[in-house]
Each structure stands twice: as C-alpha cells, then as structure tokens.
C-alpha cells in the first residue's frame, strides 16, 4: 500500500492510537499534519517522522474549541494545499455512574469525542470534494457497540460516531470519498493504563486472542482503510478487538 502524495491529518496525534496512526501513515508515504494539545509531544513526533525520512508538521489543537478547529484546518490547507485523509481520533473519558454523572462531564465527552469529529469533517471535506478523493476514518470503540457501565457519556459518544460515519458515507460516496470507522477493543494506551490489574485480567479472559491490543494493531486497520485497496469499503465499522465482540 502506498499513500505517496497524500496529506493526512490526525487528531489526538501526540500519543497512543493517534501517534501510532501518524507513524504508520507516514511509513506508507503520506505527509502528516499532527494535531493535538501537547506541542512538545507533537514536536517530538515531527522529529521522529523526519528522522525516518517522512514529512510531518505540528498543529496544536484542542478539538473541544470550534474556532481552534477552523483555524487549524485553515493552517493545514495553507501549508500543504489539501487534506486527503482525516483520522478523527481525539477522545477523552470522564467515567461515572449515570445517576452521579455531572452534566459538565457528559458535555465535555460528547464535545471532544463526537462533536469534534463532525466539525473536523466539515472543515476537511471541501478539499476532498474538489479533488474527488478522500478518506475519513473515525475511531470509535467496542463500548459504542456494546455499552459499558460507568461510561454512559463515552459509550454514547462512540455510538454516535458510528451513526455519523454511515451518514457521511452516504452523503459523499458519489464523489469517491469513503468514510469508515475503526472500533478498538481493549488497547494498551494511556487511557487504559490506569485500570486495576484484576480488571485487566478479567478483560483478557473475554478476548479469544488472549491479549490486550496495541496501538499498532489499530493503526494497521486505519492505514488499510485509507488505501486504494479499500476503495470499495465505506460506511463500515472495522472491529479491532481480538474477538471480544463478534457479529
């Protein structure tokens, strides 16, 4: 698979799944626009990609801020001239039982995980429509498919991403633009590193492949969906969960 000549923008690119996606897309030949809140981590990743012979630039961004999204996408288009690939990966958790969940925690998770994907897509899609080629990948979650106690806000946001994916796929398919979702299961990231060991062991027992996934497992799926080999796949949710959820 080659993405030579393509420009990919990845949100939440400073760590975890977003970082792995940026590296994998770069290895496939894409130029990467790295967007996240941590300027230092982004600059480190720019250097790492550059040292490997790739091309990347950092764009500090809080996806919870609509004006920042607009200005960041404008800056990316000014620097690179186009956006071929958008990976909506930025996400947060604010876990609590629904009866105790504060409205602010509901709003912040929905804003960061779901509303930002709509806003980012809206800013990128004009470039894709003009060139009649585009790939939009939304990083959802197994918990958007099966729910999770204590994560009503997170599960709702990730389920919403699946609906958003399908709606966009129908809207832009005639312009040779695909929109798909990748649904990770338990992945070894900063977001899951704080889980209690007994919870982790219980989770592993639910996974037929017998291990927790890695960010590279997800990045491989994302890179495939951005390639020409996946040109006839759209509106699809690709599960990367070790078999934890099937069907």
Image (spheres, rainbow, N blue to C red):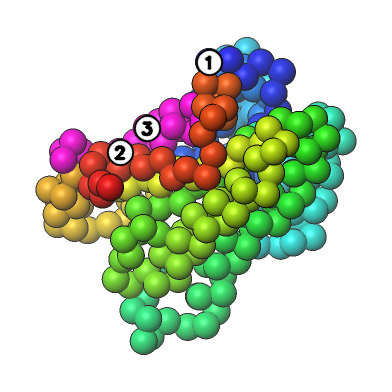
Q: Are marks 3 and 2 in contact (CB under 8 Å)?
A: yes
Q: Residue at 40% x, 59% y: name it.
A: 144
x, y percentage for residue 75?
83, 41
Q: Image quadrant of residue 176?
A: top right
Nearer to me, 216 or 244: 244
Asked if residue 222 is among those painted magenta in the image, a careful observer would answer: yes
Bin the neighbour count of mark 1 within 10 Å (Cα to Cα): few under 14, some 14-19, many 20 and up. few
Task: Please give the residue where the numbered disc 3 appears in the rendered image.
Answer: 217
Give the spatial CA distance, label 3 vs label 2.
6 Å
CA separation in Å, label 1 and label 2: 23 Å
Residue 1 circle label: 1
Q: Which mark is residue 178?
A: none
Whether residue 244 is visible, yes or no, is: yes
Horizontal and vertical percent position of residue 5: 71, 18
The magenta span reads 208-225
Q: Which residue lies at the image location 16% right of the left edge and 40% below the top edge?
A: 208
Compared to residue 55, the image places residue 34 above or below, namely below
Q: Which residue is mark 2?
A: 213
């Amino acid at each position: 698979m080659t993405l030579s000549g393509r420009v990919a923008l990845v949100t939440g690119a400073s760590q975890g799944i977003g970082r792995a996606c940026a590296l994998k897309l770069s290895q496939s030949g894409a130029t990467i626009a790295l967007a996240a809140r941590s300027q230092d981590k982004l600059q480190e990743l720019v250097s790492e990609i550059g040292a490997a012979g790739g091309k990347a630039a950092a764009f500090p961004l809080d996806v919870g801020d609509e004006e920042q999204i607009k200005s960041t996408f404008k800056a990316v288009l000014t620097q690179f001239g186009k956006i071929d690939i958008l990976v909506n990966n930025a996400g947060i958790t604010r876990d609590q039982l629904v009866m105790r969940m504060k409205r602010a925690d509901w709003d912040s998770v929905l804003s960061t995980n779901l509303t930002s994907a709509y806003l980012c897509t809206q800013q990128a899609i004009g470039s894709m429509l003009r060139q009649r080629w585009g790939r939009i990948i939304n990083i959802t979650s197994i918990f958007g498919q099966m729910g999770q106690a204590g994560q009503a806000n997170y599960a709702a946001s990730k389920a919403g991403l699946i609906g958003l994916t399908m709606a966009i796929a129908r809207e832009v398919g005639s312009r040779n633009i695909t929109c798909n979702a990748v649904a990770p299961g338990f992945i070894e990231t900063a977001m899951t590193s704080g889980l209690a060991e007994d919870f982790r062991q219980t989770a592993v027992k639910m996974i037929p492949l017998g291990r927790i996934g890695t960010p590279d497992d997800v990045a491989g799926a994302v890179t495939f969906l951005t390639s020409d080999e996946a040109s006839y796949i759209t509106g699809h949710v690709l599960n990367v969960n070790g078999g934890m959820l099937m069907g």
